[in-house]
Image (tube, rainbow, N blue to C red):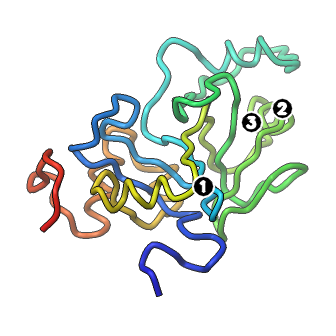
């Protein structure tokens, strides 16, 4: 069986991609991406280690129909990727499954409704969550070709890595999870 696929239909769905030093795209420098969909038609995922500094959850709540009577506890927002940066998605644990929630695996799901944002704002949301604005996407066979070109390494996605590891540590932790020492990575493309 091809090592890039778990099944013939889900490919890398539910895995993480670690950007390699030779990837020449500022959107993905030292990025860790959670792949929420990968099939013959392409792939989609979210960068999970790059916080948005200039826009807050309070700013987002004020733009949506979320009526808050008290200040909202600060919640980080993430740069999910370069595509459709105003569209929001929530990666979360599967203890919260409502409406449009889609399980990506046993432990992680994705939702995109205002309802989950409202529940998060009022403390009724999932135990763990990550709110991403925008997403990354690949056309059919594009991601496979980028992996062959050594732009990405594939690592297992765990709730610990996705939700609990500090953002500045996620890239290194992902590499360590498969036994790769980041100090030994070369920024030049090529194959051994």
Query: Disc 2 or 3, which lies upstream in sequence?
Result: 2
Label located before the other in sequence (1 or 2): 1
From the viewer's side, name the closer residue of 4 and 132: 4
Disc 3 is placed on an element classified as helix
Badges 1 and 3: C-beta atoms under 8 Å apart?
Answer: no
- Above or below, comparing residue 34 to residue 71 in the picture: below
Residue at x-position 18% and y-position 50%: 189
Q: Which residue is mark 3?
A: 120
Q: Residue at x 55, y 55 (%)?
A: 35
Label 1: which secondary element? strand
Q: Residues within 10 Å of mark 2 (few under 14, many from 20)?
A: some
Q: Is residue 127 left or right of residue 173?
A: right
Local SS, label 2 = helix
Image quadrant assignment for residue 58: top right
* CA separation in Å, label 1 and label 3: 30 Å
Q: Position of residue 133 (x, y in %)?
A: 62, 29
Q: Which residue is mark 1?
A: 42
**Quadrant hosting residue 113:** top right
Query: CA gap, disc 2 to disc 3?
Result: 10 Å
Could you say which disc has been placed on residue 15 in the image? none
The residue lying at 16 percent from left, 63 percent from top is 191
Q: Nearer the viewer, mark 2 or mark 3?
A: 2
Label 3 neighbour load within 10 Å: few <14, some 14-19, many 20+: some
Left or right: residue 61 versus residue 149 is right
Q: How far across and down, in percent of the image, does residue 158 sit?
A: 50, 63
Mark 1 nearby-residue class (10 Å; few <14, some 14–19, many ≥20): some
The residue at which mark 2 appears reads as 114
1, 77: nearer the viewer: 1
């Amino acid at each position: 069986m091809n090592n890039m696929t778990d099944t013939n239909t889900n490919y890398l769905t539910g895995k993480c991609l670690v950007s390699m030093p030779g990837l020449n795209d500022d959107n993905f420098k030292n990025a860790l991406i959670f792949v929420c969909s990968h099939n013959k038609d392409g792939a989609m995922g979210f960068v999970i280690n790059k916080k948005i500094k200039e826009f807050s959850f309070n700013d987002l709540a004020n733009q949506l129909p979320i009526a808050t009577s008290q200040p909202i506890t600060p919640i980080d927002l993430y740069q999910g990727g370069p595509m459709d940066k105003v569209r929001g998605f929530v990666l979360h644990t599967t203890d919260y499954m409502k409406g449009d929630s889609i399980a990506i695996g046993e432990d992680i799901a994705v939702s995109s409704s205002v309802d989950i944002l409202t529940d998060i704002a009022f403390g009724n949301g999932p135990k763990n969550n990550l709110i991403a604005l925008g997403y990354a996407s690949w056309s059919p066979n594009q991601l496979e070709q980028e992996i062959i070109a050594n732009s990405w390494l594939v690592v297992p996605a765990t709730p610990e890595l996705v939700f609990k590891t500090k953002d500045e540590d996620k890239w290194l932790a992902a590499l360590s999870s498969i036994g790769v020492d980041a100090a030994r990575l070369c920024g030049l493309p090529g194959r051994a």
